[in-house]
Amino acid sequence: MNARRKPAHDTPLPAGGLQAAGRQRPSERRSRRIRPLAGGPVWLFDLDNTLHHATHAIFPAINRAMTQYLVDALQIEHARADHLRKHYTHRYGAVLIGLARHHPIDLTDFLQAVHTFADLPAMVRAERGLARLVAGLPGRKIVLTNAPETYARDVLRELRIERLFERVIAIEQMRDRRGWRAKPDAAMLRRALRDARARLSDAILVEDTRGHLKRYKRLGIGTVWITGHLPGHLPRHGRPHYIDRRIGSLKSLRLGSRSGRQKCSRLTRKIRQ
């Protein structure tokens, strides 16, 4: 006579059997979700032409390197390569996204090649007192850049402000299982803020590219357009409707004066309305 086999489980099943054991109450599912951190504003800082003056030397070098890379990789004329670089930047927010969609190029090699400099310290320029300005802002600070992470961190170290940011979201971190993403992709920003445990309603993007600000304003975040490092001449006043504040310098966000505290308070209060 064969011995009767014992059940595989030692603990009793709840009423309803296996199906009931696999079900969770809605309250239990909600409790397991990662909730946003409560608190003040979450500052999202662009890097180039926001935290430093990239137009001075770095952008010209990157543009030349990108154009030459396209000439060599795609075997096209210089004028055509320059056109593609500008077109992909305008259409997709980053040249890399255009290359990913239209050309069989090693994108990791592309990023490294066009962001390598012989003397980066000599090329970096920024506002005086930058560290004090950033440190004086209330709330959390995150860098959100379409540049590669190694370059972004190298620049932040040169500026001596890397420690002021809780994380750097570079273009490698924007990538998902469907492929490369970059600003101003909406799904990317939602995911990035979710991973950072930050709410859209608390986020303030400080950025020099108006197209990115326009797209993200639709998500309900605060928008600050910084113009001081942009090439060419802009009207001294006025801002599009999707810009909450226009500033020429990060000094305009500082809290060291009563007017500065009032302006920052108005901005964060406006975002929460």
Image: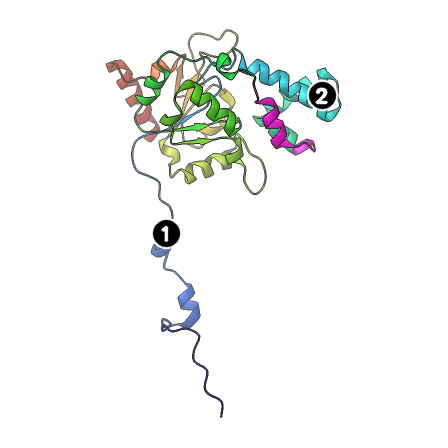
The label shown at residue 71 is 2
| Residue furthest front as drawn | 118
Left or right placement of residue 251 versus residue 147 in this view: left
Q: How many marks?
A: 2
From mark 2 to mark 1, how far is it between C-alphas? 51 Å
Mark 2, Cα crowd under 10 Å, few <14 / some 14-19 / many 20+, is some
Amino acid on which disc 2 is placed: Val
Q: Residue at x 59, y 27 (%)?
A: 111
Q: Report the mark closest to the observer, 2 or 1.
A: 2
Q: Residue at x 68, y 19 (%)?
A: 68
User: Which residue is identified by label 1?
Assistant: 32
User: Residue 219 sits in which quadrant?
Assistant: top left
The local secondary structure at tag 1 comes to helix
Q: How is the image coloured?
A: rainbow
Q: Is residue 261 visible?
A: yes
The local secondary structure at tag 2 comes to helix
Give percent across and percent down for residue 125. 46, 12
Q: Is residue 242 visible?
A: no
Give percent across and percent down for residue 254. 31, 17
* Segment tinted magenta in the rendering: 101-117
